Image: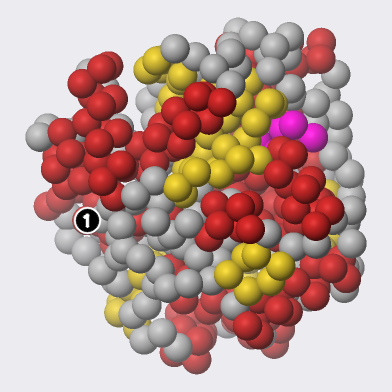
Amino acid sequence: MRYISTRGEAPALSFTDALLAGLARDGGLYVPEMFPALPPETIAGFAGRPYAQVAEAVIAPFVGDEIEPAAFRAMLGDAYAQFRHPAVTPLAQIGDNLFILELFHGPTLAFKDVAMQLLGRMMDHALKARGQRATIVGATSGDTGAAAIEAFRGLDQVDVFIMYPHGRVSDIQRKQMTSVDAPNIHTIALEGTFDDCQSILKGLFNNHRFRDELKLSGVNSINWARVVAQTVYYFTSAVVLGGPHRPVSFTVPTGNFGDILAGYIAKRMGLPVDRLVVATNENDILERTLASGTYQVRGVVPTQSPSMDIQVSSNFERLIFDACGRDAATVRRLMASLQQSGAFTLPPDTLAKIRAEFDAFRTGETGTAKEMSRVHAECGLLIDPHTAVGVHAARKALDKNPSVPMVVLGTAHPAKFGDAVKKATGLTAPLPPHLAKLTEAREHFTVLPNDQGAIERFVRERARAAR
């Protein structure tokens, strides 16, 4: 399996090279040259199997012979042994044909753990095999940073630098990142928004001299391995609900489009997905794009679901590339327009193909709070505000087609957003025992200006790969 850039001007890479590269050198994102197909009988056979075994069957075709099968199997077993539920990603029913897929049973209580625990092990394995070090740089709107820090803390082969928007993440999200006292972990509170963090991140990768000197690698969902690892739970949840013998729909609260893109990949691999529903908060660029065909950046509005406070959804580029017939020239033109004017308009046939697969709904702050209250009143279940955005959108989608099971991706534990949950329900969501002392932990972080040069200097002074 080879990997090509969505912008068509970078060399094709192997899985391991794409894993370590993150962003392509032409600024594009890596995608496989083709999507492997899983026959219906294989998918049906996933029913009742341990999560790690399903993950091996789904991910192995993308890895090929890059990792020896026994070593890969051991990584999977170790990664998913870190989860507090035996099913890893269990389903909970909250209504007629309405389910929540609980993706928050990992070490940092967010869906990012499902991929990051595996990604850390794969990257460490690849670097050790090559006798190399890497400098991992990442941008987070809250959950990616904590998951990356947990997955890579203490590893000899890597130094990790995570940028988050100063004052724009929840207290628990921040402390999960800043309370880790490990010599290879560096947490940066950037004076700006998540989009500013992400813009600087792309700038670091596009500074090829800096990138090569410090051997940069990325763990955001720009990294293909992150996305493909998230594809697994679409298969495991669908077979519980009767797949592949019946279709299943999914609603995904999303900002950067990586988690819902994983559902699209699962569909391309043969999973009978009916609809993929984009759930947005007031930062509704994806809902506006599907409605009008024009992707136009506006200012970021702070909300109670901060991990979705995003206007530039990086992974949308991967979907556009596929929907426009893998025409890299079209992608380059659209991304250049976004860079120059903050907007682009999708070609009509590309928009039609996206609308054939996806729906999108927006939920405001009041609707989010009401959904948290409703779910608790009806089911006795506390959900976080991001999941509430997803449930609100899912109800709208179910009104259109109530006969197809709808799975909402529950992206975070309610305790990560305790203030929002308590305001909506009057109840406190307790942290699991392993994080009970987190609020008392000493924090370690550096506040830096929204300036790429300042970030480069900070990283260069601390990264061991350049020494």
Q: Position of residue 367 (x, y in %)?
A: 30, 42
User: Is 265 a magenta residue?
Assistant: yes
Residue drawn at the location 80% of the way across and 73% of the way down = 332
Q: Nearer the viewer, residue 404 or 427?
A: 404
Above or below: residue 181 compared with residue 450:
above
Above or below: residue 35 compared with residue 249:
below
Residue drawn at the location 46% of the way across and 19% of the way down = 98
User: Is 260 a magenta residue?
Assistant: no
Q: Is residue 116 visible?
A: yes
Relative to 2, 353 lies left or right: left
Give the mark count. Answer: 1
Q: Nearer the viewer, residue 68 or 79?
A: 79
User: Crowding near pointer 1: few (<14 within 10 Å), some, many (20+)?
Assistant: some
Q: Secondary structure at mark 1?
A: helix
Residue drawn at the location 63% of the way across and 58% of the way down = 292
Residue drawn at the location 61% of the way across and 52% of the way down = 291
What residue span does the magenta drawing correspond to? 263-268
Q: Nearer the viewer, residue 146 or 329?
A: 329
What residue would you read off at disc 1? 171
Relative to 77, 42 lies left or right: right
Q: Position of residue 198 (x, y in %)?
A: 52, 70
Relative to 230, 386 lies left or right: left
Judged by its main secondary structure, the magenta piece is helix
Above or below: residue 192 compared with residue 389:
below
Q: Position of residue 183 (x, y in %)?
A: 38, 66
Above or below: residue 344 compared with residue 360:
below
Residue type beneath disc 1: Asp
Relative to 243, 467 lies left or right: left
Q: Is residue 101 visible?
A: no
